[in-house]
Image: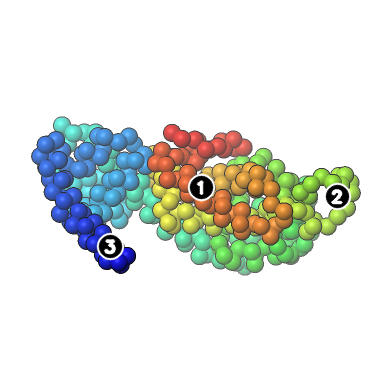
């Protein structure tokens, strides 16, 4: 019975999409004198609400020109808009704002697609200790986070002081590749105050049952906090999954005026790091073994926020002053 009801429901959805919806669009255009793209642009403010509807309209279109607009090179956006307006018989002189709105939204759409490819390439690039650029980035990360503690050697237990698992950080970057390192370095450089505070907090015992001198004599591996660098790599994975799934479109379409960039994603990473720190404290886990549970719960919370089409996680990035803003 349940299978039969599911088949019937799917049939009516198909009928609605193929027949009734197209018929409704035709009638609406005749009544308003505007095509669907015009109605979307004129009735929705710039940002996720407009761009997501334009993206859906283009994807559902039967016209190859409209469908291909989703995968353009950014340099071809302007010419494609001219072709779309000609196809829809829209006079650009009497509808100048339409071209501007379409251009902004199309740049966001194709820019997001390009960003996904760029981030995926960075994630696939494995850390190579023979690559001097990679080594320089790693050394710079140490200097940003431990400016007063010279590194005794490339392979050293000192790396545990900033949250790596062993004496060679290379092994911790296997999952997220160079993306994990670049995010950590961006955080340390552009929001240094917050990064240093998080690093300090991560090394503290969960309860101040011992005085400071007594704690400092203990091994750093016994801190009941979390490993800063490892958490950064995990939050990189979280940000990456939000990007790949499309959930991050809401945020990026609201904060990037046109083409979303890697910098926008790195600023989002900084926001997620700070919010996870607060979330971790609020959850008050008994030990690091609860990390996966807390991370999953945090992930679900971010997904709920991104379902609000007006959400911008960090609309104006300011070092040490990130917060959720509903535009």
Label 2 element class:
helix
The answer to whether residue 199 is seen in the rendering is no
**Is 212 on the left or on the right of 40, as rendered?**
right
Give the residue displayed 51% in from the left and 51% down from the top.
Answer: 300
- Measure the alpha-carbon separation of dots 2 and 1: 35 Å
Label 1 element class:
helix
Category of crowding for the residue at label 3, using alpha-carbon neighbours closer than 10 angstroms: few (below 14), some (14–19), many (at least 20)? few
Give the residue displayed 44% in from the left and 49% down from the top.
Answer: 248
**Is 285 on the left or on the right of 299, as rendered?**
right
Which residue bears the numbered disc 2? Answer: 215
Vertical position of residue 172 compared to residue 280: above or below: below
The location of residue 243, given as percent across then percent down, is 45, 54
User: Of the numbered discs in the image, which one, if any, rests on residue 302?
Assistant: 1
Category of crowding for the residue at label 1, using alpha-carbon neighbours closer than 10 angstroms: few (below 14), some (14–19), many (at least 20)? some
Q: Nearer the viewer, residue 170 or 212?
A: 212
The location of residue 72, given as percent across then percent down, is 29, 54
Vertical position of residue 25 compared to residue 159: above or below: above
**Is 146 on the left or on the right of 246, as rendered?**
right
- Measure the alpha-carbon separation of dots 2 and 3: 64 Å
Q: Nearer the viewer, residue 282 or 119?
A: 282
User: Of the numbered discs in the image, which one, if any, rests on residue 5?
Assistant: 3
Label 3 element class:
helix
- Measure the alpha-carbon separation of dots 1 and 3: 34 Å
The location of residue 32, given as percent across then percent down, is 14, 35
Q: Quadrant of the C terminus?
A: top left
Of labels 2 and 1, the one closer to you? 1
């Amino acid at each position: 019975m349940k299978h039969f009801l599911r088949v019937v429901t799917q049939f009516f959805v198909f009928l609605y999409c193929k027949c009734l919806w197209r018929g409704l669009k035709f009638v609406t255009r005749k009544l308003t004198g505007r095509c669907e793209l015009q109605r979307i642009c004129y009735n929705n403010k710039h940002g996720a609400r407009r761009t997501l509807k334009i993206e859906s309209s283009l994807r559902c279109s039967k016209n190859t020109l409209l469908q291909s607009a989703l995968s353009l090179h950014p340099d071809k956006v302007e010419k494609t808009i001219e072709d779309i307006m000609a196809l829809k018989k829209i006079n650009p002189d009497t509808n100048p704002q339409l071209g501007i709105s379409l251009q902004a939204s199309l740049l966001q759409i194709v820019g997001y697609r390009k960003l996904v490819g760029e981030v995926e390439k960075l994630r696939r690039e494995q850390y190579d200790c023979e690559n001097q650029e990679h080594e320089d980035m790693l050394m710079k990360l140490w200097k940003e986070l431990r400016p007063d503690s010279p590194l005794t050697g490339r392979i050293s237990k000192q790396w545990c002081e900033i949250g790596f698992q062993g004496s060679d950080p290379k092994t911790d970057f296997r999952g997220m590749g160079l993306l994990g390192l670049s995010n950590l370095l961006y955080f340390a450089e552009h929001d240094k105050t917050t990064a240093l505070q998080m690093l300090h907090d991560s090394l503290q015992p969960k309860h101040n049952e011992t005085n400071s001198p007594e704690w400092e004599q203990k091994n750093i591996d016994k801190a009941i906090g979390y490993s800063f660098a490892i958490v950064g790599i995990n939050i990189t994975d979280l940000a990456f999954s939000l990007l790949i799934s499309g959930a991050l479109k809401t945020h990026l379409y609201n904060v990037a005026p046109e083409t979303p960039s890697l910098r926008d994603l790195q600023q989002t990473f900084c926001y997620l790091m700070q919010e996870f720190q607060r979330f971790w404290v609020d959850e008050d886990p008994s030990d690091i073994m609860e990390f996966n549970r807390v991370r999953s719960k945090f992930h679900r919370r971010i997904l709920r926020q991104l379902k609000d089409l007006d959400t911008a996680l960090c609309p104006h990035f300011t070092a040490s002053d990130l917060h959720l803003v509903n535009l």
